Every structure is written in C-alpha cells, then in structure tokens.
Amino acid sequence: MLAFAQKKSLPLGKTIPMNIEKDAVVGITYTLKEANSGDVVETVTEAQPFYFLFGFGNLLEEFEGNLQGKRSGDSFDFKLSPEQAYGPVDSTAIVDLPVSAFMIQGRFAEEYVKEGETIQMQDPDGNALPGKVLKRGLETVTIDFNHPMAGKHLHFAGTVVEVRSATEEELDHGHVHGPGGHHH
Ligand code: ZN
C-alpha cells in the first residue's frame, strides 16, 4: 500500500531521476584539460554528448568513480593523476626504428613521417599501433608508442546530460545503442 500511495503522490508525467550506477547509460558533456598546463585536450558539447555504459570497464575506473551517484543535470569537476589515468611514460615504449621501416614503394614516406605527427604503424600481428614521431635521424626514426596522455594529470569538468537504464540488448553487447552509441 505504501508503494501505491507514493506512486499516486508523484506529479503526473514526472519520473524519479535515476542515479548513475552499474548498467546505466550515461550521457555527458565535458572539457578535458591537461591539468598542469591548462591546455584543452578535448571538448564534448551538447551538440554531440558522449554516451557510455556505466560499470562495464569501458572507461577509466577512477573516471567512473567520480560520476557514480550523480543525476542528469549534475555537474562534475575532478582531476586524475597519471596513475589513475593512462600511467607514467614508459621509456621502453620510445624506440628507434630503421628508416627502412618507413618506405612506401621504395621511397621514404616523408610526407607522413614528420616530427610531432602521429602515424599508424603495425605490430608483428598486424594490429594498428599509433606512434608519435619524435625525431627523424639519418638512419633511424624515433617513435613514441606511449598513450598520448601518459604521464599527464587530467582535469575533467562537465555536466551529466542523461541517465537512463540500459536495454537488455545494450547489456548483452556491452555498449550503448542509438544516439551517441553504436548503430548496427
Ligand atoms: Zn550492439
């Protein structure tokens, strides 16, 4: 009877706002800055919010931890250390590769292999592996295969724009469908 009474007392057309918890589909807008320099790394606006399935290990654990319990309309503002984010810079992931690894049809691909550019390489299994060109020498090219945000302190600030229950199908697939999600 009590539950019935509570239901009746809710204003028509209103639903109880849902908190962010496991199996929720969450939509957010945010600005990501590199915390030390203040440089803006990424901006996600209302025009195209970022949607994800909460509690499925799809995002950084500490990122999700800072959003847990929030509701649509709530804002957030938090920082993550490299250890909480993409780890420290791994010096063994910075390697010198022979110039011969960058030949296209017998010619050095200088239009792609420029200092500061990120290029798509392949590991021995054929998986795509992005690397940043640090230095082009006469015989070798120095490539940094660290995550671009390795060693950096991250500062996220934004707003939760939607929280809803995931559908059975979304839970089954482990990702969000519809606007901002997968289309298949
Ligand atoms: Zn799917």
Image (cartoon, rainbow, N blue to C red):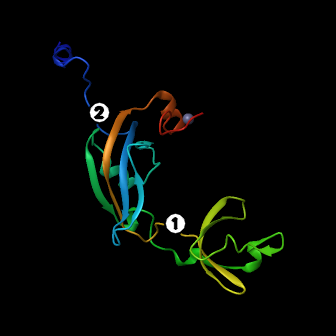
Q: Quadrant of residue 88?
A: bottom left
* For marks 1 and 2 on the same chain, the one whose residue lies earlier in the sequence: 2
**Residue annotated with mark 2:** 18
**Other-residue count near label 1 (Cα within 10 Å), few / some / many at <14 / 14–19 / ≥20:** some
**Residue annotated with mark 1:** 147
Query: Where residue 165 sits in the image (x, y, percent)?
Result: 38, 31
Q: Secondary structure at mark 1?
A: loop
Asked if ligand 1 lies within 8 A of label 2, the reply is no
Query: Where residue 20 sits in the image (x, y, percent)?
Result: 32, 40
Identified by mark 2, the residue type is Met
For the point 37% across and 45% down, which residue is it?
28
Q: Quadrant of the N terminus?
A: top left
Query: Where residue 155 sits in the image (x, y, percent)?
Result: 33, 62
Query: Where residue 14 sits in the image (x, y, percent)?
Result: 24, 23
Q: Quadrant of the C terminus?
A: top right
Distance of mark 1 from mark 2, alpha carbons?
Answer: 34 Å
Q: Secondary structure at mark 2?
A: loop
Of the four image quadrants, the one with ligand 1 is top right
Identified by mark 1, the residue type is His
